[in-house]
Image (tube, grey):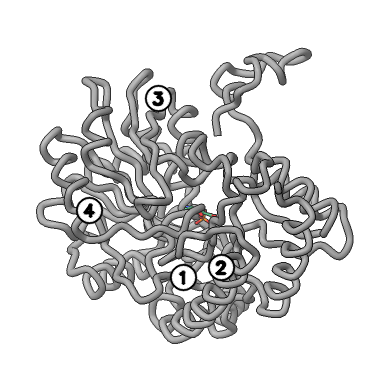
Amino acid sequence: MVSKSKPGVYSKKYHISKRTNQLSPSGIRKFFDLLASIEGVISLGVGEPDYATPWHIVESAIESLEKGQTMYTSNLGMPELRQELARYLHHHYDLQYDPNTELLITVGVSEAMDLAMRAILDPGEEVIMPDPHYVAYDACVILAGGKAVTVPTYEEDGFELSAADVEARITDKTRAIFIGYPANPTGAVMSREKMGEIAEVAKHYGLLVVSDEIYAKLVYGVEHTCVAALPDMREHTILFGGFSKAYAMTGWRIGYAAAPKEIIAAMTKIHQYTMMCASTMAQVAAIEALRSGEESAAEMVEDYGRRRLVMVKGLCDIGLSCFEPKGAFYAFPSIKKTGMTSEEFAEALLKEEKVAVVPGSAFGDCGEGYVRCCYATSMADIEEALARMKRFVSKHQRS
Ligand SMILES: Cc1ncc(COP(=O)(O)O)c(C=O)c1O
């Protein structure tokens, strides 16, 4: 997120670049650090599966280490992994990517986003994105010298992005539309129809759609629309995908970008001087995840689906109105009835009831009045957190 504090706030002693000064520390991390210092906290804070990585995936990495597979890989990533990924994208979305030129294995989607923004933006160029959005989207744009232009989205529209609102913000400096559905923090999923409208705008104005589809597998009773698979969109899309969420592999730091070869070549130039390659053992694990991880991923998603229902019902029963999330693993209830800001709510809830949630304002102005509750935690913890929140809300409810 962009800092609202004065530039130069971190630079009293050392010169810190203006670009870096524009950023404030992630609102998610802040709560993560705070809760680590308090005992007995139930965390609905960090967006991370509570599962360990499925054992067959871990084992494949252990075996590779035992065999001494500890060297750098190709900058693009291991050929077997790129081939497996090409097969995966073809199987799921009927998309054809050349594994030798159009796929890049990265250190998580996080690195892929950074590379993409640095590869496509010149100073002052604009990227349109929904508000609220995942905290890194605008940060990557700023660090690349660009400008993030936000489009408000609202609970009453299911937090979907309107193509007309996007179109209204296009200028001669606009280069891309940066989206991420299923969405963090709202759990929104764009319908194929609405996504198609965004795609038409992108094609009409010759813009790229930068699409973070890290939660693609985490949908509940609705379909995920892959932007690149919409008619003629492959040439207009930088697609990100990852292993962190669906395969419970956050700590492995592995993800990928799929895009036309000119874009992958530009991203690879930056990647080869900064990361060189993603971790070798994580790449081996990712091959196993793609080859044999479907079943364990599906089991986890089924379980998240059950927790989602309990979380949403629980929040509504407390009286915190909650838009029904259709994807990812977040609920985004409104806390407006308490009269607190989302930051005040999250801080007081943590102090008084030891439940950690993330203030919606960490994700943009439209997140104010909401908090993000991650339900990728045990059912017992969800139920206890809801009981504590109920006590908290009845104490703070405005009469
Ligand atoms: C929407 C979204 N994109 C990207 C990431 C980062 O993914 P990775 O672990 O692959 O870097 C996250 C992590 O929370 C996320 O929520």
> Looking at the image, which is closer to me, 250 or 399?
399
Quadrant hosting residue 200: top left
- Separation of disc 1 and disc 2 at Cα? 9 Å
> Looking at the image, which is closer to me, 264 or 376?
376
Residue that numbered label 3 is attached to: 146
Q: Tag 1: residue type?
A: Ala
Q: Tag 4: residue type?
A: Lys
Label at residue 249: 2
Question: Which mark sits nearer the N-terminus, 1 or 2?
Answer: 2
Residue that numbered label 4 is attached to: 194
Question: Which mark sits nearer the N-terminus, 1 or 4?
Answer: 4
Q: Helix, strand or loop at disc 3?
A: loop
221 up-or-down from 241: above or below: below
Q: Tag 2: residue type?
A: Met
Query: Residues at badges 1 and 2 in contact (C-beta under 8 Å)?
Result: yes
Q: Is residue 384 left or right of residue 247?
A: right
Q: Tag 3: residue type?
A: Gly
Question: Which mark sits nearer the N-terminus, 4 or 3?
Answer: 3
Query: Residues at badges 3 and 2 in contact (C-beta under 8 Å)?
Result: no
Mark in front: 3 vs 2: 3
Q: Helix, strand or loop at disc 4?
A: helix
Residue that numbered label 1 is attached to: 286
Q: Helix, strand or loop at disc 1?
A: helix
Question: Which mark sits nearer the N-terminus, 3 or 1?
Answer: 3
Q: Helix, strand or loop at disc 2?
A: loop
Mark in front: 4 vs 3: 4
Name the quarter where the N terminus is drawn. top right
